[in-house]
Amino acid sequence: MSFSVFGLEGLPYVSEGDDIARLIYEAAVSIGLEFEDKDIVVVTQKIVSKAEGRIIKLEGIEPSDFASHIGKMMDKDPRLAEVVLMETSRIIRMKGNTLIVETHHGHVCANAGVDFSNVKDGYVTLLPVDPDASARGLSDKLFELTGKKLAVIITDTWGRAWRLGQVDFAIGVAGMAAFRDYRGETDYLGHELRVTNIAVADELAGAAELVKGKSAGVPVVIIRGYDYPEGDGLGSDIVRPVEEDLFR
């Protein structure tokens, strides 16, 4: 199997209320790109959050006593701590200047996905309220514009519990299964596979990041030629249930 991964350049700076699907379509038209059935459109969370108005100006935030305590203890802006707490359902770890929390979506990540990058000074972005709904909306609108069956993955960059460095993960999925499940199949030597369930949506998110980078200004990537598993997958499918989590 082989597939191609290429960045979609030419998208304008995204602001609240922008129609991202139309911006993607128009950027593709401007460079002569025609979408094909089973293309995968990988979109960084940041532009989705901007379009959905998930931006907060820190100047208007009044930190609680707890946020002020966290700010002092962790050398963190207490207003930022308050925003993180607003997006948090459970604090998992507090170490150094990083809060590891469980978001209202169930994701476990640093600072609840609250981020300063690629926004104006004094502002932060939050994760979309429902990344899967955002992905589904993009997929539906892109089908209207192109007539093609396209999968959509919305990504964000997080660290990992067992390894250094960050990678991109899928937080929203539409138009494909999130996993390629090998359980019940046999390996090359005929042994039954019992636990292998590959999170292909995460792997595709990581592949897309290699093209996007963090400073190249390319928030959308097209993956073509990958025979992804069919299904109505969700980014939330990948979230490990609390009862199976060895760290919570």
Image (spheres, rainbow, N blue to C red):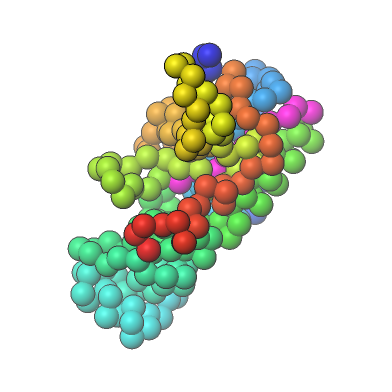
Residue at 22% over, 69% down: 74
Given residues 160 and 35, the one toward you in this image is 160
Given residues 173 and 56, the one toward you in this image is 173
Q: Is residue 110 above or below residue 14?
A: below
Given residues 202 and 64, the one toward you in this image is 202
Residue 24: x and y, percent?
63, 34
Residue, far bottom: 65
80 on left or right of 104: left
Q: Is residue 134 above or below residue 190?
A: below
Main SS class of the magenta portion in the image = strand
Q: Is residue 165 above or below residue 127?
A: above
Q: Is residue 153 magenta?
A: yes
Residue at 41% over, 81% down: 62
Q: Report if residue 1 is visible in the image.
A: yes
In which quadrant is the C terminus drawn? bottom left
141 on left or right of 241: right
Residue 212: x and y, percent?
44, 32
Residue, far top: 1
Q: Report if residue 24 is visible in the image.
A: no
Count of numbered circles on the image: 0
Residue at 61% over, 27% down: 228
Residue 4: x and y, percent?
52, 18
Residue 72: x and y, percent?
22, 76
The segment highlighted magenta reads 147-156
176 on left or right of 102: right
Q: Is residue 159 magenta?
A: no
